[in-house]
Amino acid sequence: MLERLLILSAVLFCIGLYGVLSRRHIIAVLMALELMFNAVNIALVAFSRYVTPADLAGPGGMAENARYVLTGQGLAVFVIVAAAAEVALGLALVIALIRRTDTLDITGVSLMRR
Amino acid sequence: MADSLFEEIVFWVLAATTVGAALLVVHVQSLFRAALLLIVSFLGVAGIFVMANAEFLAVAQVLIYVGGIAVLVIFAVMLTRDVEHSNLGTPVQPVALMLAVVLLGALTYAVVQAEWNLLPDDLPGPLAAVFVETPAQLGRLLVRDYVLAFEIAGAFLLAAVIGALSLVRER
């Protein structure tokens, strides 16, 4: 079960990577980036459910440290936060780009200053 | 046994939906369709979260990705011209394909040959209890053990929103 979840995550990540590298339109690149975030979250959730965390053996024993099996899910929450911030900033950049250059083809955008 | 067969079927349906929709996202010509397919892919991932005992993340996935990010993306797509044929490839497409396939092979090899320190199949009592009430336990983990990261995430989101506003502000 762990292996197939991780392979599903790897497949999704590679589709996202291909999309990021091969698309011309900046919004398509952002969408592929979201796919990569999702792939990472699947891997984190799978680890959280199937792998024994090292913290489980800490002081207090299993009863005290049982909540640490959810560490992966906790990290996934922060990944979602980062993804939300990324998409908000990315789309703000898209709108700024439309105003400034009237194109969203990232192969044509290489300026670093006005 | 019937239960696990049902689980198998649900897993493969969800996995096929997620991967199929993701493949179409990077292939269809119309950006608008790509955005709609992205929603399908997000929903498939939410289903997979439910199967792996991550109920809170599944709900957060639907609320934030489907409800927030997808709507933002569609809004941005609406602002662009020539939506129907704008999702074209770059000249480096073959290289990108090769890189993705090589990385997939490497990751698959790493996953298959690694020796995982797996949890036992029938979970010991305390762990089983955690997976019964994941949202409550996750909440405790976030505001007790990782409270600093939690607060930083809040400040980070505020900074991102202010940054986005200042980027699009009319001068």
Image (cartoon, grey):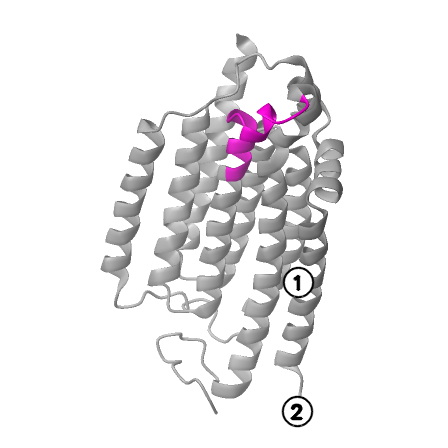
Whole-number angstrom distance, CA of label 2 to CA of label 1? 25 Å
Look at 44% across and 39% down and name the residue there. Answer: A9
Q: Which stretch appears magenta?
A: A44-60
The relative height of residue A108 versus residue B1 in the rendered view (above or below) is below
Position in image of residue B42 (x %, y %): 55, 45
Q: Main secondary structure of the magenta part?
A: helix
State which tag comes first along the sequence, 2 or 1.
1
Q: Residue tagged by mark 1?
A: B156
Quadrant of residue B48 within the rendered picture: top right
Chain under callout 1: B
The relative height of residue B122 versus residue A39 in the rendered view (above or below) is above
Position in image of residue B95 (x %, y %): 23, 59
The relative height of residue B84 versus residue B47 in the rendered view (above or below) is below
Task: Tell us which disc is closer to us: 2 or 1.
Answer: 1
Look at 52% across and 57% down and name the residue there. Answer: B35
Assign a secondary structure to mark 1: helix
Residue A112 visible here: yes
Task: State left or right for residue B128 relative to residue A100.
Answer: right
Q: Residue tagged by mark 2?
A: B171
Of B154 and A34, nearer the camera is B154
Number of other residues with Cα within 10 Å of mark 1, as a class: few under 14, some 14 to 19, many 20 or more: some
Of B48 and A85, nearer the camera is A85
The relative height of residue A70 versus residue B78 in the rendered view (above or below) is above
Quarter holding the C terminus of chain B?
A: bottom right
Quadrant of residue B86 within the rendered picture: bottom left
Q: Is residue A47 magenta?
A: yes
Position in image of residue A86 (x %, y %): 57, 62
